[in-house]
Every structure is written in structure tokens, then in C-alpha cells.
Amino acid sequence: MMLRWLPYPMVRIALFFMGGVVYGIYFPEFFPFKVIVALGLLLTAAFFVVKASSKNNKFPLASGLIGLIVIFLLGYARLVLFTHSTYDDHFSKIKSKIEAYEAIVRSVPEEKAKSWKVEIELKSVKGNLTTSKLRETGWQPVTGKLLLYVSKGHLPANNWEYGDHILVKGSPQELSPPANPGEFDFKRFLSFKNISHQQFVQPEDVKFIGHSSRKGFIYYSNQTRAWSMTKLNEFIHGDDEKAIAIALVLGVADGIDNDLQNAYAASGAMHVLAVSGMHVGIIYAIILLLVKPLGRYWWSKWVTAAASLILLWCFAFVTGLSPSVLRAVTMFSFIALARPFGKRTNIYNTLAASVFVLLVYNPYLIMSVGFQLSYLAVIGIVFLQRPLYNLWEIENRLGDWVWQITGVSIAAQIATFALGLLYFHQFPTYFLISNLFVIPLSTVVLVMGIFLLATGFISPVASLTGAMLEWLVKLMNWIVFKTEALPMSLINDIHISLFQCWLLMGILVTLILLFEFKSIQWLYFSFFLVTMFTVEQWNHFFNFVDQKQLIVYSVNGHKALEYIDRGQSYFLADSALSTDQERIRFHIQPNRLQHGVSNTTARIPFLHQKNGVNYFSINKKTFAWISNEKATFPLNNSIDYLIVSHNALRKTGLVKARTSHIIFDGTNSNRILNSLRQENKNNKIELYSVLDKGAFILQ
């Protein structure tokens, strides 16, 4: 077994480094950092002692294990050192309230419906500081990043550039955890980008100080991408065509509307809308094709490697050095560098080396969905595509080409199947059909898009290229919409837990190993994992699906109440929320997925109204829902739970409520709530605000 493991040193190193990073993410305070450092130094010394004690390395297992544990600890240490919130000078460590701060723009402003969103890095803050030196200036140097939302107004936030200095009035607010069950954890997602706070400001609260004197590499990369977007917008007409072309060539998908994005998702072609491994792989393949005539010279392999590195990183520069492009370019850079060494290396060591370098650069990349899907897809293609291709020998050239693309699609889908269900809760049934057309078309669009940028200064050539490009994108969109329109094109509302995802990946791996080594043991192991998956599925059914739940959701400015009874949902909400599919998808749908909701009704059949108050009973508990301050309560009846909307108790008050529990939904103001809290000083009634505490759940 050890002899089989010997040719993969970088795989071992990368796996243990990843293990240290993951350990640090999930157990950040299990061991003090100083203890980890001391243990690492001790084990490093032990490693060299074991090595020096035997010239012939009589203890390879011991020295190897010690070395890998040191790599594990290095992964943990790198994560801790990369986490800004652990720094002593992080702005979150300041106890006093921040009045203002100076910051540097660290992203291109992104346009939202009512504001501009920009990532900024704090340099100094002003507040009620304590040290004598700081009392004189009032400013304290700090570190840390946050998201700044600037309301749209006269301030040209869209003209800010990377590296600009700004002055902001006010105090950042810490990001809140998810307010509803199953909701996307935006706070955790941003923590992987070293962002823990945000602030919403008006244009008059921000002062532009000036442009940075040091532009830097990233600044010029962003400027190049902005110029490229201008050129694509200039020579391509049609909103959908522009959006898809910009997404394919530059990786900017902000302009794609929901219908078009859903169509690509339903057809299984979503991967082409983000510049990643496939796009960089296409460019690398084109580079190899262009330098192929030089293959007869001994030095051609080194020229190929140098040309690949230069052109790949030039492409990354044009796309604004986005994380997904950097990840893919780094991966293919290692592949390009490994090619000149021929048989002295293998693809798995090369991939592992790129993973190791990327995680040293940014250990939080391991939590990126794109990072996980990209490497799983590449590993799946490398390991499975050739065996799948060999299953069917087609002599026809066109048929052989179709089978090659089909094999690539199947291999990538097998490798990413479990993660796709975990993150996206859906499976596109016609991915083979769509990819058969979309992959070749997207390849041509990518190449022509790059050609358009290269000839952008020659208007006639660029105009002709843009017209052809627009026609190709229209054809690709037409294929995607037609695929989406096929019956059962998308199996959605799939729910699996993280543990089930691991079990699914284990089942797939054991089945692959069964065919690889033809050993019955892998079949037994696979059967064991299938049994565990089934048990976990039954456990989820009894704990979530076969249950009743009443929930008042936390949606700011909206009322939303849902009663779930064994997969049947009765949902009551205001008209604005009921028709807002994006908010439903973000706030409401995750809980429905978890509880196996298959049917939703926009009313509660056992609800009745009296004197402006809605009444209903569930499991011998009486509920009332009031949304009008003119409504009156029967003086001789008491209720168990009162749900309040639109400040309905502003005049009625708590005295007439005749209940022990009051739940305030997202339509109530803080001012009215604070007034009612003062009225309830004796705590006779339990007050619950979903905006403060999250969704109210009665299981």
C-alpha cells in the first residue's frame, strides 16, 4: 500500500494542509495558537532527529507521519494568521463607538436596486479613545474590511476606483446571523473574505479624499476589465447578448436577468456563465494548438510552457484577477510547468501542488463553492473521462467528437453530483444535450470575444466580430431556453444534509473503485454507505417532514406566516412579498426544502375573522393575528399567541390583548416596540420581535 502511495508526495502534503485549514475553520479555539506553534516546533525538531538517527531512514513511517502532522499544524497556523479578526488592531476590538473612519476602496462598486455596494479596507478610525496620545488627534490606526452600501444620490460612487481614499461618517454594524431557518448564512460567507461588518450610509456621509498615488497591479487590472466591458457593450447589441458575452469572456455576470440565469441553470449550462476552469482550459488548449508546429524542436516544450504562462496570466489580468480566474489560471499554470518534465510528474501531484499554493495564498478558498466544484470536476475528468471514452469506440469522426464531449460532461457531473445537490438543491436532467451544443458554442464565443478585444481599435473588424458574436450568443440562448422547456428538464427542491453529501461522494468513490480494482470489498463498503444514507434520510423525515410547524418569518417590512403540516404549506403574506420570488427563494424556500413541502396554499382553511382579528387553532393552542389598530378583542376570550403586524397595538395597547405571548412580525417599527416594552415592565406578557430575535418557530 505504501509503495502505491509513494508517487504522490504533493497529494499527501496538500491533503494534510487542507486538514489543518478545515480544523481551524470548524474548531478555531480548540487549542490556543501558542500551543499549536510550540507543538509544531517540537514535532519539527523530532522529525529532524528521526531523520538524522538513521542514514538509511529505517523509520520512514514515523518520520513521514511526523512530517505530515507538522504540515497539518502549518495549515492551521496559516488560517489563524490569515484571519484579520484575530489581530489586536482590528477595528472590532475598539470598545468605544466609532464616529468616523478613513478607508481605501478595495473593489469595483457594484450597482444594487437602491444603492452602490463596495468593499473597503479601514486604515484609521475616530472615536472616544482613551490613551493620552490618541486624545490629541482622535484617530487610531486599525485594520479590517467591511461592506459599505451607499444610497444612490448625487455621489458618483460608480466612479470610485480601486485604491481610492474615502472618509465615512458613522459606525459599522456587525453582520447578523441568518434570521430564518435554513437561510443562507451571509455572515459566515463574508467571514471567509475577512469581512465581519457592514454599514448603510447616505451620500452626504461619505467624503471622497482622493485617488491613490500608488495605483498597483490590481488597479490596472480592474481598469483593463472596465475598458473590455466598454468594448463589448459598444460592439454587441441586445441586453441578453451583452450580458452573456461579458459573463463568458470577463466573468462578470451582474447583467444577467433572473429568467436567463434560471434557464441556464435548468439546462445544466450554468457553468459557462462564470469564467473558471473550463474557460481557462479552452485558452490553454488553443495555446497548445498554436505552438504545435514547433513540436519537432527539443526546446519547444519550454517555449510552450513560457507562452502558456504569459498568455494565461494576461487573460487573468484582463478579467480583473477575480478569485475564480486566479484559481483556474494557477491550476493550469502548474499543468503547463509540469509538461516539460514529462514522465517525472503526474497530473494528481500537479493538481495537489496548485491546491497547496492557493491555500497558502488564501486558506479560506477551501470554503469557496467554485473552488470545490472546479477541482472535483477536473479530478473527475482526469480519472473518469478516458475509461468512459474507451467503453465505446466510434469510427465516425463526428460521432467520436460527440462521444468525447459526452464523456467529459458525464465525468464532471459524476464528480460534482453530490455538491450540486447540497448547494443548489436541483439536478438538470438534460445536461448532456445542452452541453453538447453549449460547450462548443461557448468556446467559439470566448475565442471571438478575445479577438474582438484584441481588434477593438479597428472598428470595421470589431463591428463584424461583434455582429457574429451576438448571433452566436442568440443561438446559444435559444438552445438553452428550448432545453429548459423540455418536460422534467429540472429536478428541484432536493434537500440533503452535509453528512449525506459526504455519504453520496463516498458511495460514488467506492463504486468507481469497485470497477477499477474489481474487488468485492468495495461493494460491501458501498452497501454500508447506502444503508447509512437511508437511515439518515429516514431520520430527516421523522424529525422534519413528518412534523407540524408554525413559523412567523423575519422579513424586514413584510408580514409572512406559514403553517406546515407534513409537507402541506399554508402561507399568508402581503401581496408584495407573495409576488417577490427572489425574497421567497432567499427567506422562505430553505425552510420549505428542509420540511419537504410539496404543496403551498395561500390561505389557512381553518382561519376565521371577527372584529378585524384573524383567529385559528392548532393542537389546542389558540392564535390571533391582528394587522389593524382599529380591531377589537372580545373581553371574555383569551388567546395563547397574538401575532401583530403594522403596529396594530399602537392604540390598542397591551392591556386589551389578553394573551401571554405576543409576536411582532417584520412590519412593526422599533419605536412602537420600545414603547410597548416600557408598558410591559412587569414582564406579564412575553414579547417577541422577529426583527430582533429571528423567526418565531412553534414546533
Image (cartoon, rainbow, N blue to C red):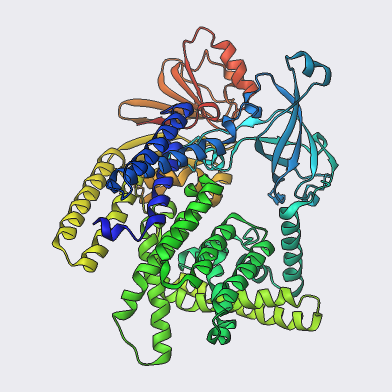
Which residue is located at x 61 percent, y 79 percent?
472
Q: Position of residue 398 (x, y in %)?
A: 43, 89
Q: Residue furthest top?
A: 682
Left or right of 56 on screen, residue 34: right
Q: Is residue 72 above or below residue 222?
A: above
Quarter that holds the N terminus:
bottom left
Question: How many discs appear?
Answer: 0
Of all residues, the one furthest to the bottom in this rendering is 396
Name the spot of residue 75 as percent of width and height, x first. 46, 42
Q: Quadrant of the C terminus?
A: top left
Residue 251, compared with residue 91, is above or below; it is below
Q: Nearer the viewer, residue 615 or 24?
A: 24
* Vertical position of residue 2 compared to residue 398: above or below: above
Report x, y in % for residue 620. Answer: 31, 26
* Viewer-nearest residue: 563 or 163: 163
Q: Residue at x 40, y 80 (%)?
A: 404
The answer to whether residue 194 is left or right of residue 407 is: right
Residue 464: x %, y % from top left: 73, 83
Would you say residue 430 is visible in this rendering? Answer: no
